Image (cartoon, rainbow, N blue to C red):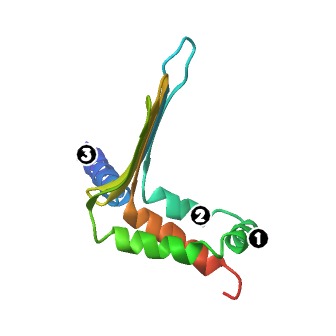
């Protein structure tokens, strides 16, 4: 019985450590809601550390092709993300056109995009450190590397 309790404690402690490591960078949150009959309500929460890890599963040829197509934009995106990290709470863009509203800002070190229009809303929240990791991996996968 004591051996079983030790095994359970070890397994429980391991799960806590794995969870803490996985969620250390935060969560990527995507919420899409359609307010109509039969409308979709999609809410996805992913550990932010999972996205750069998942890029290691993409076949090298496909990743290189994407990096080739994005090679002009990746250095710009990396520079933008690096600069955004200096402003953890900043309003970047806000557009209001009638009943449509789009807001892009940084909030507590995360990029936050909110878009609403009649009958639909979209909310995206992604840690800037995750975006930095993704752009870094794309740049490293590009031509000449």
Read off the residue under disc 1: 61
Position above or below: 4 against 100: below
Screen quadrant of the N terminus: top left
Instruction: Give the foreground label among 1 and 3.
Output: 1
Q: Which mark is residue 120?
A: none
- Quadrant location of the C terminus in the rendered image: bottom right
- Tag 3's secondary structure? helix
Q: Is 141 rendered above or below residue 124? A: below
Q: Residue at x 60, y 72 (%)?
A: 73
Q: Position of residue 129 (x, y in %)?
A: 39, 66
Quick check: 43 above or below 112?
above
Taking the image as drawn, is residue 6 in sight? yes
Measuring from the top left, give residue 130's x and y in whole percent: 43, 63
Which residue corresponds to mark 2?
Answer: 55
- Crowding at dot 3, Cα within 10 Å, few <14 / some 14-19 / many 20+, comes out as few
Disc 1 crowd, CA 10 A, few/some/many (<14, 14-19, 20+) = few
């Amino acid at each position: 019985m004591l051996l079983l309790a030790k095994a359970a404690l070890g397994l429980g402690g391991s799960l806590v450590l794995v969870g803490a490591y996985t969620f250390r960078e935060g969560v990527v949150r995507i919420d899409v809601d359609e307010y109509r009959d039969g409308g979709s309500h999609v809410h996805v929460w992913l550990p932010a550390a999972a996205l750069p890890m998942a890029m290691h599963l993409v076949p090298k040829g496909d990743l290189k092709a994407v990096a080739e197509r994005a090679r002009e934009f990746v250095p710009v995106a990396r520079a933008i993300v690096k600069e955004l990290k200096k402003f953890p709470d900043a309003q970047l863009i806000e557009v209001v056109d009638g009943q449509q509203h789009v807001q892009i800002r940084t909030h507590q070190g995360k990029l936050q995009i909110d878009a609403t229009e009649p009958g639909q809303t979209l909310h995206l929240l992604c840690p800037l450190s995750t975006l930095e990791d993704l752009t870094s991996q794309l740049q490293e996968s590009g031509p000449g590397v």
